[in-house]
Amino acid sequence: MKFKKKILCIGAGYVGGPSMAMIAYKCPDYMVTVVDINQARIDAWNSAELPVYEPGLDEIIKKTRGRNLFFTKDIEKQIAENDIIFVSVNTPTKTFGKGAGKAADLQFLEKTARQILEHSQSPKIVIEKSTLPVKTAQAMERILSSTKRNITFDVISNPEFMSEGTAMNDLDKPDRVLIGSHETKSGLKARAELVDIYARWVPKEKIITSNIWSAELSKLVANAFLAQRVSSINSISALCEKTDADISEVAKAVGMDSRIGSKFLKAGIGFGGSCFKKDILNLVYLCNYYGLKDVADYWESVIKINEYQQDRFIANILGSMFNTLAGKKICLLGFAFKADTGDTRESPAIYITRKLLAEHAQVVISDPKALKNAAIDLAQDQGSKISYIEDPYLAASGCHALVILTDWELYKKLDFQKIYNSMVKPTFLFDGRNAIDHKKCFDFGFNVYPIGKPALSHLMD
Ligand code: UDX
Ligand code: UDX
């Protein structure tokens, strides 16, 4: 079959895989190829068990794979054959050298830019899909124009705003698609080419264009604002616990102000995921770099509150359980950083588990999708004290406490009477997501400790 356009994506991760699947699905006349240096990842994309769990992704892959969506490791050949190249390689926080712990590690991005340069024989549009520090496109352009070969490269910033667990819906009906380019003749032409792709299914008014630096910065800022809301509500949850106010009631009352809005006001154990912390650290680094220390400190406090919230949660578990967890069995319900994903990157569950192990607790971890990743995350920890049991009833049986860490829908529907009956007494329930009916669980006999609400304890009588 002759395809109208050929599109390549380098990086078959959580972003590259689903976003290219959506383009392939919406544009059956385009050929979309996704490459990755990791053979196992490519094999998984070509198998029945995809490397990423995302509701709705399986169906779209079934409809597109082998038709106009292809996964391969053959990066060089694909660079040569495609003129539109998305770059979706990972950009983790640097762990070494200058900016360690804050700046983005751009080595994979730079390596990819060099690969593109080496294997290109015709003009290319190179699209940054990864979240990057503002001005990265400049570095990319400098690498791409570093030889005298007569090939033009237009670098575009098209950050992805999809959220895990709802990625397919976010890709299908995005709030906006942002495309940043240079405002030169060839930059605008490249921008138009990308607008054409999205216009196949996204209403024109939702496709916004900007200069390239605004696009890069907007992605960082959007994530920073979202994380800031989570830290804001979590900071108030601490005050609620001191004053007998109820954080859900406060969030509702505050969020009904249309200027504030109701989303992202759910108190919990703090945000996780591969983006929020990394992107804020990145923003902090950038602000410091440009001499804006007060601005950097302001954003850094969002991360500090996130860590404070997790420490507070652990202190509450320890304090409520008579200041000793040694030898006690604690069941964690949920390990993923949020519901509807198997992703555990930066999940608060990792930190919380380690703190419980440090208190010599035995930890039983349950999660419908994230147990494989949990075992990888905790591979270096005291293996003998951790067990992994998917069935929540079996996991909870014989435990002293239940700790809800992920707001999986299935936890709301559990038979908590049955669970209570199988646990050691007195029985503790720490709901780190305010996900379940606390009063009902209290009536079954649990001592219930929500976030930002008064505890319901039989031990206080
Ligand atoms: C994305 C974005 O790219 C990142 O900037 C954003 O902030 C988080 O989301 P994600 O798709 O979640 O990253 O990362 P990951 O699942 O790790 O996928 C990246 C893929 O790129 C990996 O499969 C990795 O093997 C691949 N890769 C990395 C390459 O193909 N080439 C490289 O040189 C480096
Ligand atoms: C985020 C952004 O939402 C998305 O636009 C961007 O492209 C990538 O980063 P993601 O990390 O997948 O997406 O998840 P998100 O839904 O934003 O949740 C992040 C964390 O905040 C989760 O740990 C979640 O549990 C937590 N959260 C979110 C809260 O604790 N309370 C809330 O009200 C909302």
Image (cartoon, rainbow, N blue to C red):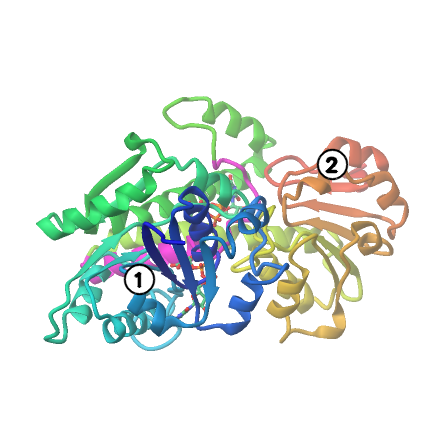
Label at residue 152: none
Quarter of the image where one finds residue 34: bottom left
Label at residue 456: 2
- Frontmost of labels 2 and 1 is 1
Q: Where in the figure is residue 157, as x and y percent of width and height?
A: 26, 52
Query: Which secondary structure, mark 2?
Result: loop
Quarter of the image with the N terminus is bottom left
The one nearer the camera, 180 or 457, is 180
Identify the residue shown where x is 77% and y is 52%: 401
Quarter of the image with the C terminus is top right
The one nearer the camera, 318 or 383, is 383
Q: CA distance from mark 2 to mark 1?
A: 61 Å
Which portion, as a residue range, is magenta?
264-291
Judged left or right of residue 207, residue 345 is: right
Three-letter residue code for mark 2: Leu
Three-letter residue code for mark 1: Asn
Identify the residue shown where x is 43% and y is 49%: 24
Q: Which residue is mark 1?
A: 82
Query: Which secondary structure, mark 1?
Result: loop
